Image (cartoon, grey):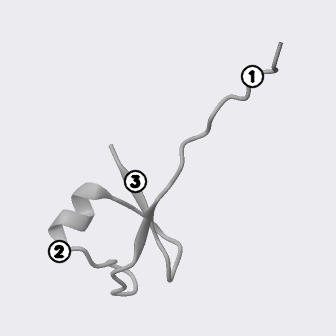
Amino acid sequence: MAMYKCFKCGKRISHIVLKKTKGKCSYCDSRIFYKTRSVVAKVKAV
């Protein structure tokens, strides 16, 4: 499931909600989003 973050208010929004609201943030009506990064495990180099 893809999660997006609103650039203006910082709320996390799923792709399903974005589809329902036609690409608008349901909190602030902004249309600028970016995809949040998942936590990546760091591995020590050999």
Horizontal arrangement in the rendering, residue 1 relative to residue 38 (left or right): left
Front-most of residues 13 and 43: 43
**Which secondary structure, mark 2?**
loop
The answer to which of marks 1 and 2 sits earlier in the sequence is 2
The C terminus: image quadrant: top right
Label 3: few (<14), some or many (≥20) within 10 Å?
some
Q: Residues within 10 Å of mark 1 (few under 14, many from 20)?
A: few
**Location of residue 5 with respect to 3 vertically, above or below:** below
In the image, residue 34 sits, relative to residue 16, either above or below, namely below
* Marker disc for residue 43: 1
Report the Cα–Cα distance between label 1 and label 3: 25 Å
Badge 1 amino acid:
Val
In this rendered view, identify the residue nearer to me: 26 or 7.
Answer: 7
- Asked if marks 3 and 2 touch (Cβ < 8 Å), the reply is no
Q: Mark 3 points at which residue?
A: 3
Element on which disc 3 rests: strand
Residue 10: image x %, image y %?
A: 53, 73
Quadrant hosting residue 4: bottom left
Q: What residue type is labelled 3?
A: Met
Closer to the chain start, of discs 3 and 2, is 3
The vertical placement of 41 against 3, above or below, is above
**Residue visible at 32% across and 43% down?**
1
Residue underneath mark 2: 22
Label 2 crowd bin: few (<14), some (14–19), many (20+), radius 10 Å: few
Of helix, strand and loop, which one carries label 1? loop
Q: Which label belongs to residue 24?
A: none
From the image, state whether disc 1 or disc 2 is nearer to you: 1
* Residue placed furthest toward the bottom: 29
Upstream in the sequence, badge 1 or badge 3?
3
* Residue 43: percent from left, percent from top: 75, 22
Q: How far apart are marks 1 and 2 (CA)?
A: 40 Å
